[in-house]
Image (cartoon, rainbow, N blue to C red):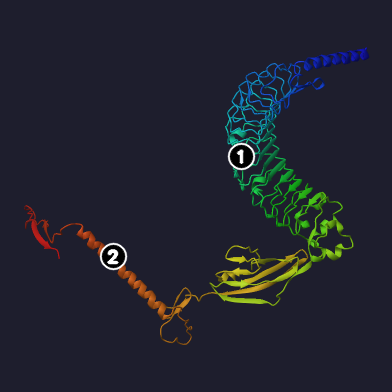
Amino acid sequence: MCVAADWRRVYWWLVLQWVVGVALAGPCAQCCDCLPKLLMVNCSSRQLNSVPEGILEYAQMLNLTYNHLKTLMKWQFSGLTQLRELDLSDNMLTIIEVEAFFGLQNLLTLRVSRNRLKIISVGVFAGLPNVRLLDISENEILVFLDDMFREMPSLQKLEASENDLVFISNRAFSGLINLQELNLNRCNLTLVPVEAMSQLTGLLQLRFCRMGITTLPNNSFRQLSRLRDLRVSHCPWLDSLAINSLIGLNLTSLTLSHCNLSSIPYSPLHHLVYLRYLDLSYNPITSIQSNLLGDLLRLQELHLVGANLLRVEPGAFRGLAFFRLLNMSSNRLVTLEESVFHSVATLEVLRLDGNPLACDCRLLWVMRRRLQLRFEGQPPTCASPVQVQGRRFGDFTEVELPWLFICRHSRILTRKPQDVRTDEGHTVLLFCEADGDPEPSITWLSPKRSLLTGSGRIRVLSNGTLEVRYAQVQDSGYYLCIASNAAGNDSISVSLRVRGFPSSTRNRSGPFFLEGWSFVSGQAPGNGSHGSQPFPFDVKTLVIAVTMGFLSFLSSVAICFIFMFLWSQSKGQIKHTATIDFVPRSSASAGGCGRTTMETGRFTMKLV
């Protein structure tokens, strides 16, 4: 019974295929190719100026590419209820009327790329409740309007790259609750559309490539907690990321390549604890600092190709226990020490080709692990020393390694003890020269054994010399110079003594001290008195100083008199006499009970 039922299903399926084939072979044969077995109608490259008529509802795929279609009318495809895929790419479409696709209830894929659309009106995509993929790339669209995609609730991928897009309204993506992938490459946006992006709470992948953005501000991608893959590349004016620009994201893959970042954005990255893939290639990054990437606990791949990288500091990848791929090809690295990694045991792929590598003891660890490491078909090449220049890492034998990959211990050249003495306020240079292979780095420690840097009043110069500017008494002590390279360290201490100015604890009859300089009388000091110090200024300097001060005083007085004269002239004629009335104190009678008499007086004053 089961076998008979199966035969009946096969029979009726063959009959259905024949019926559909006959139905499709008739009306569309004149201008299109019908493929009954695939339920497909191919009208590509037929010089069509309009959508052909007579395409029956059995078709599930309709190809209208490479024609001359300019307008899609309302309900243009209303009869094709079974259509699953519609491709209108490579036409001349400039107008799509509202509800042009109405009736395509089962449509899953709609492609309208490489046309001449400048604007898509609200309602154009009405009647497309099941579309999963929409491709409107390579048009001339200038703006995304509010609710433009609202009637496409099932849309999962929106391809909108290579348009003239300059503005995305705040509610343009309203209704796209299921959108997972958005591509906005090669648009003219200069700012991240933060409000519009906040509508896409289900987004998993976002591409911002070849755009004119200059920075990523704080909260650029807020509400996108489900986003896993963010790609921002080929943005030559992007030179900074705000500290909280990536806050709220739980990315597993991040690409920030072909931009203008001068350093790794440590602060914006530190919270991305689920990040596994990081690409910072083709940015002008010169160094990777130590102990700043440890928060990226799950990081497995780091790509930093063509980034002008000069140095990777020891401990740069400390804490990255799952690190397995490092691509630093086409940089300016001289070496990559084992101390850079948390552990080289997890490392599987290492790309160092295109770097001027010095094949010495610092790269011996790579040679010893070359059988476990993969160079992806591009093995590193030695640039120095001369005896191995141009040789690939795979060309060395195990016997050669101990003799060629060596380093020479760092050694300080001047071993003679230095005792530098100076007066307070002077600038002092403490020298420390060393040699070794590789060239040792010079560090200085203060008398309190704190590390001195290349900034501040006491700083280390680029040639390793320690500069003490405006020396103070408290700067006195033993400074330690340390020369270090991969083969070992050497050190020497240098003594600095700073003599302060004399104290001002003197009696009134003795010499007077000001700022460490002594002023004494012409009499010779008596027994037990301190010798006077020479006067710090010569006679000529004093005469000039006194003269300048006297002239300044006279000029100030003259200006005051001139001002008073001009002010008095502006008041008109001045009276030279003044009459003053006054009332003198009252006088009582002799008995003390008489009436009090009051007398008034007047006198005239003459003003001189």
The amino acid type, in three-letter code, at marker 1 is Ser
Can the viewer see residue 288? no
In the rendered view, does 543 fall on the left or right side of 594? right
Secondary structure type for disc 2: helix
The amino acid type, in three-letter code, at marker 2 is Ile
Q: Where is residue 32 in the image (x, y as percent from the top left)?
A: 75, 22
Position of the C terminus, as image quadrant, is bottom left
**Which of disc 1 and disc 2 is earlier in sequence?**
1
Q: Where is residue 445 in the image (x, y as percent from the top left)?
A: 66, 66
Can the viewer see residue 353? yes
Q: Name the residue under label 2.
A: 559
Residue in the foreground of this view, choosing between 484 and 462: 462
Q: Residue 220 carries which label?
A: 1
Q: Tell me where residue 80 sits by quadrant.
A: top right
In the rendered view, does 349 fall on the left or right side of 506? right
Q: Where is residue 431 in the image (x, y as percent from the top left)?
A: 65, 72
Mark 1 crowd level (few <14, some 14–19, many ≥20, 10 Å Cα): many
Secondary structure type for disc 1: loop
- Could you tell me which residue is drawn at 71 percent across and 46 percent down? 279
Q: Tell me where residue 496 sits by quadrant.
A: bottom right
